[in-house]
Amino acid sequence: MSLNVVILAAGRGKRMNSQIPKVLHQVMGRPMLRYAIDAVRPLRPGKTVVVIGNGAELVKKEMAGDDRLSFVIQKQLLGTGNALAVARKELKKGALLVLNGDCPLITAKTLKTLIEKHRRSRNALSFLSFSDGAMKGYGRIFRDEKGRVTGIVEDKHATRDERKKFDELNGGVYLMEEEVLGCLEKVKKNSSSGEYYLTDIVGIAAGEGKRVEAYNCPSEEIRGVNNREELLRVSEIIRHRIINKWMLKGVTFINPETSFVSPPALIGKDTIIYPNTYLEGRTRIGKSCTIYPGSRISDSILGNNVVIKDNTVIEESRVGDRSSIGPFAHLRPHSVIGRCAKIGNFVETKKSVIGEGTKASHLTYLGDAVIGKNVNIGAGTITCNYDGKNKFGTVIESGVFIGSDSQLVAPVKIGKDAYVAAGATITRDVPSGDLAISRARQQNLKGWALKRKLKVKS
Ligand code: UD1
Ligand code: CA
């Protein structure tokens, strides 16, 4: 049987107090709406329709490139019932799952269970419920004396007695057969809010004798985001879920409270992650690595047994097995560091390839460079890759020794096994096996300092 999905995401999100549409606010580095989309993906829906309205163009742009999604625009935000009515024309034949775009904690597992129970009981309409006295403002599920669902009343419209009597709350996730969609036409505008409530179809369907049931699920999964406080709370729950998952898979966190691991990031076994670390985007960390405190690694790939020393930033780069980076290093985009290499204190690289066993241990800038194996880059070496207008490359072949405080003015090439003496400004290629010296010869003026001292005294 085919399944359609509708995600309601047109709402204003007034309480976020923001210019950004609510569903685009970030939870662990990704727009909130992504989580609902990801939760339904394993169900293999025939079609996923997202209802947008507030900030529609922005939402569409942010979700671009996902061709499994289609969008419909709800021109006037007339409530959840109206939102689904707008989406109806986009739907294919089959059952329909409806969920909210502002509930990022819902899991595929819970949705699968709902589908199973719905099918087993041959319901016309099934939805998720939960019980949690601390969660406020949800719809209340009314049942008759036989325990049959008779309808949903929003918390703000319920009387005190009703609130006392009915403490089962609406999770806002519905699974319905096509026939139930007809009930939407019977939903009346709520007289006090002026909205059409999707929740009203529950009472309408039940009243028509259709089989309707609510199934309890963990309240955590229902937790929505209406303001920044809830955004933080939801983000924290997802952060914990991710870190717990990696701990079970064999990763050690020294202080998980201060570690951030993005949902798509991957971490190998026996890697140790110290406090204040950020693994962002599609970062992949190999096995048995150590990430010391204060580092941010973004969209990068690290091999096995890599050590990242304190306060290092790595962006869109790769690091080979057994290499050591930092402390205080910055690998800017498109740095490719080979195996067993060392990028040390205050070294910055950009768009450079650094060969196996090569060391740049201190205070260096390597930009637009291709560097071979077992090269030693002395402290304070700089590739002068920019003339104010254009960028040029530097090639350093294997086995080269670059003395400290040298400038390599690109484009320039240092041949295999060559030496560059300390303090050089290299403007011409250095042939393989040569020594390049570029500095004024040293003079020692005999007794100069002593004479000066005597002069000052007298
Ligand atoms: C809704 C339910 C409530 C349930 C809760 C669960 C209704 C009337 N109430 O309340 O019973 O307990 O969800 O989270 O449905 N939206 C639109 N167009 C609109 C209005 C809303 O697309 O015109 C979208 C919003 O962007 C949001 C979702 O629908 O993603 C839910 O709307 P919201 O206003 O947050 O409903 P709740 O008050 O949370
Ligand atoms: Ca909500």
Image (cartoon, rainbow, N blue to C red):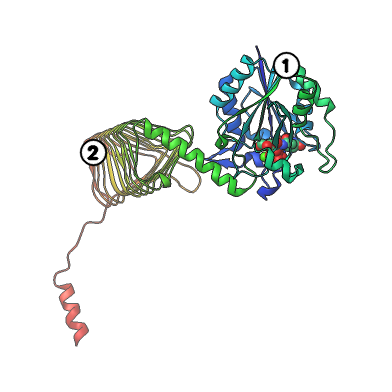
Q: Nearer the viewer, residue 231 or 306?
A: 231
Q: Amino acid at mark 2?
A: Ala
Number of marks in the image? 2
Placement of 445 over or under 169, stated as above or below: below
Dot 2 lies on which element? loop
Mark 2–mark 1 Cα distance, whole angstroms, equals: 70 Å
Q: Tell me if residue 127 comes above or below residue 57 in the rendering.
A: above
Mark 1 is on which residue type? Lys
Quarter-of-image position of residue 205: top right
Residue 198 percent coordinates (x, y)? 75, 31
Q: Is the residue under label 1 in contact with that under label 2 (CB below 8 Å)?
A: no
**Crowd around label 1: few <14 · some 14–19 · many ≥20 (10 Å):** some
- Hey, which quadrant is residue 83 in on the image? top right
Q: Residue at x 75, y 42 (%)?
A: 158
- Quadrant in which the C terminus is drawn: bottom left
Return the residue at label 1. 92
| Residue at position x 75%, y 21% in the image | 90
Residue at image x 50%, y 43%? 236
Which of the two residues, 364 or 58, is positioned nearer the viewer here? 58
Write down the residue under mark 2: 418
Q: Is mark 2 within 8 Å of ligand 1?
A: no
- Residue 441 at what x, y percent from top left? 22, 56
Residue 44 appears anywhere in the view? no
State the image coordinates of residue 443 (x, y, percent, origin top left): 19, 62
Q: Quadrant of the N terminus?
A: top right
In terms of image quadrants, where is residue 182?
top right
Q: Is residue 96 left or right of residue 317?
A: right
